[in-house]
Image (cartoon, rainbow, N blue to C red):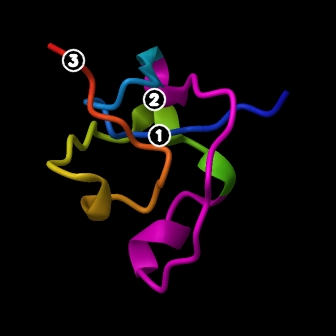
């Protein structure tokens, strides 16, 4: 199984070292230059965590807010 990297730390599926624990994900395209910055997750464990407020603030449609 491939390792998916994610910095959105307030997602239910976020794991230590910026790993995604979801069994499935939905990926969409983005024209943002930041999306290509760390292609294929290379070095993603060193990226800062980036909590978001809503699914629409992410490019990941699998995002589900973590219960506190």
Residue 51 position in % (x across, y down): 21, 40
Residue at image mark 1: 6
Horizontal side, residue 44 vs residue 32: left or right: right
Left or right of 16, for residue 36: right
For the residue pair 65 and 2, the one nearer the viewer reads as 65
Which of discs 3 and 2 lies nearer the camera? The answer is 3
Q: What residue is shown with label 3?
A: 67
Q: Position of residue 54 (x, y in %)?
A: 21, 52
Residue 18's disc is 2
> Which secondary structure lies at badge 3?
loop
Residue sitting at x 40%, y 42%: 63
The magenta-colored residue range is: 17-39
Determine the CA span between mark 3 and mark 2. Answer: 18 Å
Q: Quadrant of residue 46?
A: top left
Tell which circle, 1 or 3, labels the residue nearer the N-terminal end.
1
Q: Residue at x 80, y 33 (%)?
A: 2
- CA gap between label 1 and label 3 equals 18 Å
């Amino acid at each position: 199984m491939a390792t998916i990297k994610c910095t959105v730390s307030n997602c239910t599926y976020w794991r230590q070292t910026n790993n995604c624990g979801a069994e499935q994900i939905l990926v969409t395209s983005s024209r943002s230059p930041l999306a290509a910055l760390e292609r294929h997750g290379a070095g993603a464990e060193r990226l800062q965590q980036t909590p978001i407020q809503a699914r629409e603030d992410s490019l990941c449609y699998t995002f589900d807010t973590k219960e506190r």
